[in-house]
Amino acid sequence: MDRHDRVEVQRQQIERRIERYEELREKIAKLAATVTSADGSVSVTARPGGAVTHLTLSAQAMRRGPEGLAALLLATIQQANAEVAALLTAETKEFVSDRTDLAGLLGARLPVVDRAGGAPLPPRPAGR
């Protein structure tokens, strides 16, 4: 294989990689996770970066009072953020080194959520 052929092979590889990055960008733009609280009274849709794009509250949720509603909202939002981070990790896996703990990096920024009760657990130590 001469120099021209090697350059052409590299050019094609770069073009394929750019196409995959564009596909990933489009997937991430559409990525979202919707979570409903255990009692069904709160539903939250979150996108990468923690943006809440949809929130539904039932009459049952409103009867919890300010503190109960706030706790349930935060727990449900945190769970949605954790799920969208897991989806993002899965989508980007092919683009990061095997030595990069992307889930750990994203998870360090997100609280651990007790799925059974919907309550936030103490934050993870950084880097774990």
Image (cartoon, rainbow, N blue to C red):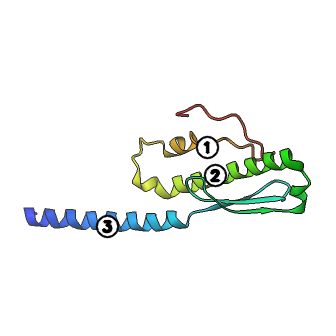
* Residue at 70% over, 52% down: 77
Left of 102 or right of it: where is 115?
Answer: right
CA gap between label 2 and label 3 equals 31 Å
Task: Locate the N terminus and report the quarter of the image it occupies.
Answer: bottom left
Specify the amino acid type for callout 3.
Arg
- Amino acid type at circle 2 is Asn
* 118 up-or-down from 128: above or below: below
Instruction: Identify the secondary structure beneath mark 3.
Output: helix
The earlier-in-sequence mark between 2 and 3 is: 3
Viewer-side label of 1, 3: 1
How packed mark 3 is, by other alpha carbons closer than 10 Å (few <14, some 14-19, many 20 or more), is few
- What residue sits right under mark 2 in the picture? 81
State the image coordinates of residue 42 (x, y, percent, origin top left).
80, 58
Residue in the picture at 84% in, 59% down = 41
* Disc 1 target residue: 110
Question: Which residue is disc 3 drawn over?
Answer: 16
Measuring from the top left, give residue 40's x and y in whole percent: 83, 59
User: Is label 2 or label 3 in front?
Assistant: 2
Q: Residue 126: percent from the left, percent from the top? A: 55, 33
Determine crowd level at label 2: few under 14, some 14-19, many 20+ residues with C-alpha closer than 10 A: many
Mark 1 residue type: Leu
Give the residue furthest to the top.
125
At x 43%, y 42%, the residue is 100
Q: Measured along the vertical axis of the image, is residue 92 above or below residue 15? A: above
Given the current orientation, which residue lies at the most extreme front position?
Answer: 66
